[in-house]
């Protein structure tokens, strides 16, 4: 018997306990109790703010060889898909798994996340939603507005495809991506190192097939509650033309749910404010806070399949920031007569026209118009404009001319309105008491008619000049003269 036991021992050598412990049955890996931590190592409470652009997810592994999977979604419209956004390295039992997430520079950026464990053979724990709150509630956020009024920024620091972006392409090889190719493009492929967003296949945008196009779309950007948002970005291009008829470049702004196009701009050397090919240059577009959650879309379309052996289109350093509100310069407000001369406060205007003029103190790049509210003295301002000027681009002075007012004393105030409907504050002209008039309108008096004889022009007849008013007497004399001459001729015959 001892010999048999010894033989069995030699035939089956001893194994360690770790080798004979089977993997846990499916569904027995406990769900992670993960936490969110800022770059300083401090726990971020549920709904807390993260201000340094990166967040860490941590959890102690209950078993050896587990990886922490984290799915991150934005609150606005996304839903969990149970596909990990970031995955940690495998860790041993009772060790801490950690994974980081670089937060897009979007304000506000509100996030909800869930996590699970996955073992070496692919078995996983259930997904556990952080915070014990609903998917529509915020686990962490970046604050409503960033430093300097920042709403969104993307400088393309990571090669590939930025998180939250969407891409559409019609070519199997030519597409939008983030990298630094081709390096040979005039002006360089990047504005700020290391990468840019560009449309090509690493060399050009010629795939040997039919015309191709594609677009790149940002994550959702919330404009609600912002003040005078403005988009800026830098671009460079190497294409076959200026971009009007072929190799067209567009930037557009869309509603994030319906896709409705709020704004579209074709960029070209001729029409769209682009500098010459091979030169990095900045574009700015005024947005509207009333548009709410939006996405930006950059689209390139070759239109044809000819002459596409060029570098493509390059976009870098995208920003949306709040800007100062529209402001009219109070010192510039004037009331002018027909000759363009300023009419002092309280003076009389009696030449049939009055022009209201003012200039912009703070603009936003949009076409602007002057609006005024004109009231008779004694009637309070309501804040509603009564007269509207024309939209004017640039920095020229704004004017509005009126005629045919009733003979009264008047007061007026002015404001600016841009093409998107943004308005400045009202500014009262004259800085005088509300009971005082800014001007008095007196209708132009018609000149009296001249009806006396001495001012009448003489009438002209074939017999010479006949003074006005004496024509009947002359006709009488002519009649009897002819009659007398006729009688004389009869007698002589």
Image (cartoon, rainbow, N blue to C red):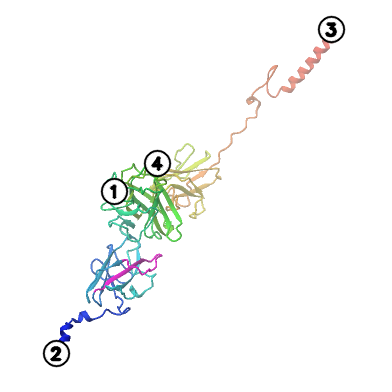
Q: Which residues are magenta?
A: 65-85
Q: Is residue 129 left or right of residue 478?
A: left
| Nearer the observer, 249 or 15 | 15
Q: Which residue is mark 1?
A: 182
Q: CA distance from mark 4 to mark 2?
A: 99 Å
Asked if the residues shown at circle 4 and circle 3 are in contact, with their CB atoms under 8 angstroms apart, the answer is no
The x and y percentages for residue 31 are 31, 76
Q: Judge the density around disc 2: few (<14), some (14-19), many (≥20) Cα neighbours within 10 Å.
A: few
Q: Which residue is mark 4?
A: 270
Q: Is residue 99 above or below residue 24?
A: above
Q: Is residue 410 left or right of residue 474?
A: left
Q: Which residue is mark 2?
A: 3
Task: Name which residue lies at 16% across and 85% down.
Answer: 9
Q: Which residue is mark 3?
A: 492
Which of discs 3 and 2 lies nearer the camera? The answer is 2
Q: CA distance from mark 3 to mark 2?
A: 193 Å
Which of discs 4 and 2 lies nearer the camera? The answer is 2
- SS for tag 3? helix
Residue 176 seen: yes
Which of disc 4 and disc 1 is earlier in sequence? 1
Which of disc 1 and disc 3 is earlier in sequence? 1
- SS for tag 4? loop
Q: Judge the density around disc 4: few (<14), some (14-19), many (≥20) Cα neighbours within 10 Å.
A: few
| Nearer the observer, 183 or 430 | 183
Q: Which mark is residue 314?
A: none
Which of discs 2 and 1 lies nearer the camera? The answer is 2
């Amino acid at each position: 018997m001892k010999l048999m036991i010894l033989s069995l021992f030699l035939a089956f050598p001893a194994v360690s306990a770790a080798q004979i412990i089977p993997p846990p049955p499916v569904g027995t890996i406990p769900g992670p109790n993960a936490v969110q931590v800022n770059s300083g190592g401090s726990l971020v409470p549920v709904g807390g703010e993260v201000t340094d652009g990166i967040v860490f997810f941590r959890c102690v592994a209950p078993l050896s060889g587990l990886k922490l999977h984290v799915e991150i979604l934005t609150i606005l419209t996304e839903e969990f898909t149970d596909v990990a956004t970031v995955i940690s390295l495998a860790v041993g039992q009772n060790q801490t798994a950690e994974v980081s997430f670089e937060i897009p520079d979007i304000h506000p950026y509100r996030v909800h996340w869930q996590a699970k464990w996955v073992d070496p053979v692919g078995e996983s724990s259930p997904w556990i939603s952080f915070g014990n709150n609903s998917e529509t509630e915020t686990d962490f956020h970046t604050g409503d507005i960033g430093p300097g009024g920042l709403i969104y920024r993307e400088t393309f620091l990571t090669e590939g495809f930025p998180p939250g972006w969407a891409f559409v392409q019609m070519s199997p090889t030519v597409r939008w991506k983030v990298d630094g190719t081709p390096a040979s493009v005039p002006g360089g492929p990047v504005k700020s190192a290391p990468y840019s967003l560009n449309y090509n296949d690493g060399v050009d945008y010629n795939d040997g097939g039919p015309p191709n196009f594609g677009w790149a779309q940002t994550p959702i950007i919330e404009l609600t509650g912002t003040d005078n948002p403005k988009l800026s970005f830098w671009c460079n291009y190497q294409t076959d033309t200026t971009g009007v008829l072929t190799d067209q470049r567009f930037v557009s702004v869309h509603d994030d749910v319906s896709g409705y196009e709020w704004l579209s701009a074709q960029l070209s050397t001729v029409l769209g404010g682009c500098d010459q090919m091979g030169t990095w240059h900045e574009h700015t577009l005024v947005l509207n806070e009333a548009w709410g959650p939006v996405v930006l879309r950059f689209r390139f379309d070759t239109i044809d399949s000819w002459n596409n052996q060029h570098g493509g289109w390059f976009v870098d350093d995208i920003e949306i920031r709040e800007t100062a509100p529209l402001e009219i310069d109070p010192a510039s407000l004037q009331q002018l007569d027909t000759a363009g001369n300023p009419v002092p406060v309280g003076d009389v205007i009696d030449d049939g026209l009055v022009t209201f003029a003012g200039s912009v103190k703070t603009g936003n790049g949009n076409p602007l118009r002057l609006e005024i509210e004109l009231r008779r003295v004694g009637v309070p301002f309501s804040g509603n404009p009564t007269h509207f000027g024309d939209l004017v681009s640039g920095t020229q002075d704004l004017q509005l001319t009126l005629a045919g007012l009733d003979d009264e004393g008047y007061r007026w105030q002015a404001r600016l309105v841009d093409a998107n409907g943004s308005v400045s504050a009202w500014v009262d002209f004259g800085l005088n008491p509300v009971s005082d008039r800014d001007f008095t309108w007196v209708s132009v008096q018609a000149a009296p008619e001249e009806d006396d004889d001495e001012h009448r022009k003489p009438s002209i007849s074939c017999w010479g000049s006949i003074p006005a008013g004496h024509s009947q007497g002359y006709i009488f004399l002519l009649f009897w003269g002819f009659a007398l001459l006729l009688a004389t001729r009869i007698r002589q015959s």
